[in-house]
Amino acid sequence: MSDPTEANGTTEPGEPAEAGRPVGGASERHVRVVLVDDHRMFRTGVQAEIGQTAQTGVEVVGEAADVDQAVTVITATRPEVVLLDVHLPGGGGVEVLRRSAALMADAEQPVRFLALSVSDAAEDVIGVIRGGARGYVTKTITGTDLVNSIFRVQEGDAVFSPRLAGFVLDAFASTDAPPVDEDLDRLTQREREVLRLIARGYAYKEIAKQLFISVKTVESHVSAVLRKLQLSNRHELTRWATARRLV
């Protein structure tokens, strides 16, 4: 999470203290967090990065790998912040938000959600924000920035990775509903993710590493995308995605 020079809670000259940063050997703030992600190794990594409560003030009180687990754990533990992946078995992060609406609306003890995803697609960002999430950051975020983002969300702020904020501003500035793309709607969220990476020129091995899945699973997703869109090869798939500005 933090390097040894940060453990004493000092800051550089002229640098303001940030939320979640250790002060005097321990965090002055405390936040209870649930991690929701379908990749166990990723959850373990996040736990190692931010879960040193004495230093970060973040206490991980539960984990979940799919929608049903997430709703059960969130309801049982009532965390202040949930780190939520967008693509989950059982309906995705949007379904977790839908089933947690009452918890988010609790005036005395609201549960707030911060999306943490590998995806930087506009439709994913907008979907979870419309569902009630307070922010959206990508998995390239540093541990220190993630801790600070968690505390900001706990306090009621909206937090976005810089590039993603524009998606939200554009979406909510428009009064027109986005057009329905029936072809795109045939794809699952994971298939869309694979499609986008294929169109960006990633090799199957690179996609597998990026999404924490096997090369065989990537191949299966690509085959499903080609079949559903009635396309013949990767070149056609790339042109299709580019025409819809999915790249």
Image (tube, rainbow, N blue to C red):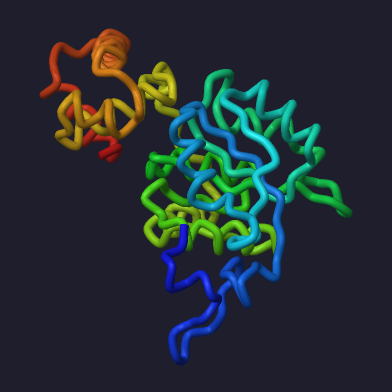
Identify the image quadrant of the C terminus. top left
Q: Nearer the viewer, residue 6 or 224?
A: 6
Which of the 4 image quadrants contains residue 131?
top right
Quick check: 83 left or right of 243? right
Q: Nearer the viewer, residue 39 or 95?
A: 39
Residue drawn at 53 percent across, 20 percent down: 89
Residue drawn at 81 percent across, 38 percent down: 102
Q: Position of residue 173 (x, y in %)?
A: 52, 58
**Numbered circles on residues, count:** 0
In the image, farthest residue toward the left: 235
Q: Position of residue 190 (x, y in %)?
A: 40, 24
Residue drawn at 38 percent across, 44 percent down: 120
Quick check: 181 left or right of 43? left
- Residue 28 visible within the image: yes
In the image, farthest residue toward the right: 108
Which of the 4 image quadrants contains residue 83?
top right
Quick check: 245 left or right of 144? left
Q: Position of residue 21 (x, y in %)?
A: 57, 70
Which of the 4 image quadrants contains residue 204?
top left
Q: Nearer the viewer, residue 156 or 167?
A: 156
In the image, farthest residue toward the bottom: 14
Q: Position of residue 200 (x, y in %)?
A: 19, 37
Q: Nearer the viewer, residue 182 or 228?
A: 228
Depicted 177 relative to depicted 70: above or below: below
Depicted 48 relative to depicted 187: above or below: below
Residue drawn at 46 percent across, 41 percent down: 45
- Residue 171 visible within the image: no
